[in-house]
Amino acid sequence: MARPSRPNPEQTAIAEKNRVKAMDLHIAGFTYRQVAEQLGVSVSTAHSYVMDSLKKLAALREEKAEELRELEVQRLDDALRRIRTSEAYKDGEAAIMGQYIRLSESRRKLLGLDAPTKTDVTSGGEKITTFDVRIETPEDDE
């Protein structure tokens, strides 16, 4: 059984340069066909280059967003810790309690702990699926 061949480093480097160039051309408004012509590849390859670049960008964006979430959680935890150890918090001062609540709400939202709840409208245990509506106008009263 034949082993899968390893990608040639030179071909990999060329393909990466083509991905960057394809993305630049696409951003500049070139169609996939025009990108393909510029790079000397098929339209499907040009499309793949752009899609691969977009996937890499999305992964990077998600990674950076997660880093930012972690940093913000650390900052919020630090602020909450400082409030909890303050004399104003121990004395139950309203202003500091309000700050604590707002910071705590921000932390919960950031972590997705306050997910929206789904509410079903029911009548007598049965779901309402239709409504009968009659709109009266002044002409109807005459």
Image (tube, helix red, strand yellow):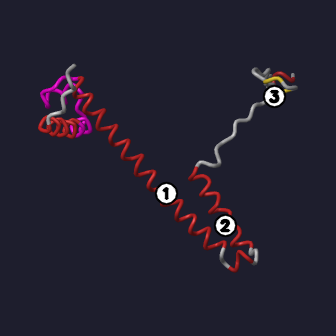
Query: In this figure, which residue is indicated by the disc labeled 2?
Result: 100
Q: Is residue 128 above or below residue 19?
A: above
Three-letter code, disc 1: Glu
Q: Residue at x 63, y 49 (%)?
A: 113
Would residue 52 be counted in the magenta stretch?
no
Q: Provide the residue span drawn in magenta.
A: 23-43
Q: Residue at x 21, y 23 (%)?
A: 43
Q: Is residue 58 above or below residue 110?
A: above
Residue at x 82% of width, y 23% of height: 126
Q: Closest to the observer: 32 or 110? A: 110
Observer-nearest residue: 127 or 131?
127
- Where disc 1 sits, the SS reads helix
Marks 3/2: CA distance? 37 Å
Q: Amino acid at mark 2?
A: Tyr
Residue 26 is inside the magenta segment: yes
- Residue that numbered label 3 is attached to: 122
The residue labelled by disc 1 is 70
- Residue 117 is situated, as x and y percent measured from the top left of the image, at 69, 40
Q: Position of residue 86 (x, y in %)?
A: 66, 78
